Amino acid sequence: MLLSADAAAGGAFRLVESGRTYTRRQLADAVGRCVAWLREQGVATGDRVLALLDHDARGLVFLAAASALGLRVMMPYNLSAVALPEWRSIVVDARPDVVVQLQAGADGRRLAGVRALAELGPRVVEFAPEIDGGEGGEGAPVGEVRVDHPQPVENFLVLFTSGSTGAPKAVSVSEALVCRRIRSVTRMLRFGPGSRVFMSGLLNNTTGVIFSFGALLHDARLFLPGDRDPARWPAEVAGHRATHIMLRPAAMRRFVESAQAERTDLSCLRVVAYGATALPRPVLAQGRRLMPCDWVQGYGLSETFGPFCWLDEAGHRDPHRMERTYCVGRPDDTLEVRLEPLEGHPPEVGEVLLRGDAVMEGYLDVASGEVARPGAWLRTGDLGSWSPDGDLLLKGRINGTVMSANGHRIYPEEVESVLSTLPGVRDVVLVALPAPDGPAEQPVACISGPLGDRTPSALRAAVTAALTGVLSQEKWPELLYAVTAPFPRSGNDKVLRSEVARQIERDALIEL
């Protein structure tokens, strides 16, 4: 993408970071310097490299250099910052050949900790070349980038993620899949030469890579945020006249609240995308008022390196589709999707299975270095059903469902989707508590936010009113737990259900 025919002509592509602007040619020169420097450090094709990067132009240049050299890059998935013990854990488990330190702002203590990783076996090298050559900068061009490995790299990215189950996984993704997903997602989001793309994601997750290299693919402009606080992004989006942004639900809430408070004019936006988990309907409604453009929801997995199922603007305008609990729209043409019935569930509910070229290579077994292929169909662990007109409706994770005392299967996504519409609710999760008088489980709806300040009778009335007419009573939780304090979250910004369950005080439970 960087060395396409547009590179010679210059093209419209520009990357803007902290007031500096870089052309495609200048980025290519920076990649060339990075490739030469990595070779000098003895890094060679096929090496497994643990990358300690920031989500900036340096990180983007390194990923392009890794492609040119044919490296295999390891990163913890979707974390804006990583603690040294997490780095050490990956080094011990995965045994990389090289650790490359790319973080420009690392302090002395952190650098000492990074250098100490060499005691565990790998070589540790620190990234020397700066991203020079932007407007007002210096830095000598190096000519064409030498590409040691022109073919797409197998096992190009290994993403260490806890996944939805909390069990550690090492997802191995080919470079071919990364490129396919960049093309399919940016096509769905209508990137083009006139697009001004705001890179809200991280370079160790799908959004950051897809948006960054997608801007290159479509000769668009790319704007990197000044920091990782979504509350500051509305002003930056307006200042850059950005046309495209994608936000996770937790970031979307902060973005929308900030834009509302500051009365930011966001009329420049053409496409707002969101994904990962269900977006509370009040946040969605407020966001659509502030940003009256096309909205797109994407459903995907780390195993597919991004979304493959979409609810487009037409879907957002259709009240019948929006009223369905956690409707994620329709699959695109990159994967075949089917539901496999499961014992103990209604016949219309099944596990979501995927087949096609746009899936991961497999899970890396760090002990042996072998990649376990997913087989003919990738089992996602997600439960879903089909609507009459072909939309996929998510129900939750297989291991997250709860069997009530009266024998009914409770699906978390259904309950959470409904209760997230209540005013004063910031987060809602459904968890299971052991019944005090037997082996059965009790489904508990846990709510955090200002609503938690209301009396038990007022809370009961609000929750039952929201559930009535939307879910049959057999699908209701038995108990309610409400607090004003935020729920504990993971580094990936997901609510930690197990931690929420542990903090529940039985005396505070409200029977529904």
Image (tube, rainbow, N blue to C red):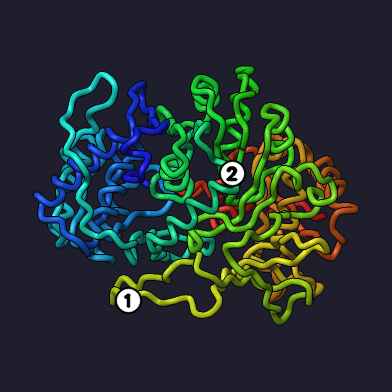
Looking at the image, residue 414 lies above or below residue 340: above
Q: Nearer the viewer, residue 189 or 307?
A: 189
Q: Residues within 10 Å of mark 1 (few under 14, many from 20)?
A: few
Which secondary structure, mark 2? Answer: loop
How far across and how far down the image is residue 384, in percent? 70, 66
The residue tagged with tag 1: helix, strand or loop? Answer: loop
- Eyeballing the image, is 182 above or below 81? below
111 or 174, nearer to the observer: 174
Q: Which mark is residue 370?
A: 1
Residue 66: give x, y in percent of width and height. 26, 53
Tell me: 349 left or right of 223.
Answer: right
Q: For mark 2, what is the residue?
A: 189
> Any mark on residue 27, and which?
none
Q: Residue furthest right?
A: 469
Task: Confirm whether residue 170 shows in the render.
Answer: no
Residue at x 26% of width, y 33% of height: 105
**Closer to the camera in the image, 241 or 321:** 241
- Vertical relation: 159 (above or below) 398: above
Whole-percent x, y for residue 47 in the image: 21, 62
Lower sequence index among marks 1 and 2: 2
Q: Which residue sits at x=58%, y=53%?
A: 500
Mark 2 is surrounded, within 10 Å at the Cα level, by few (under 14), some (14 to 19) or many (20 or more) other residues, namely: some
As shown in the figure, which amino acid type bears the numbered disc 2?
Leu
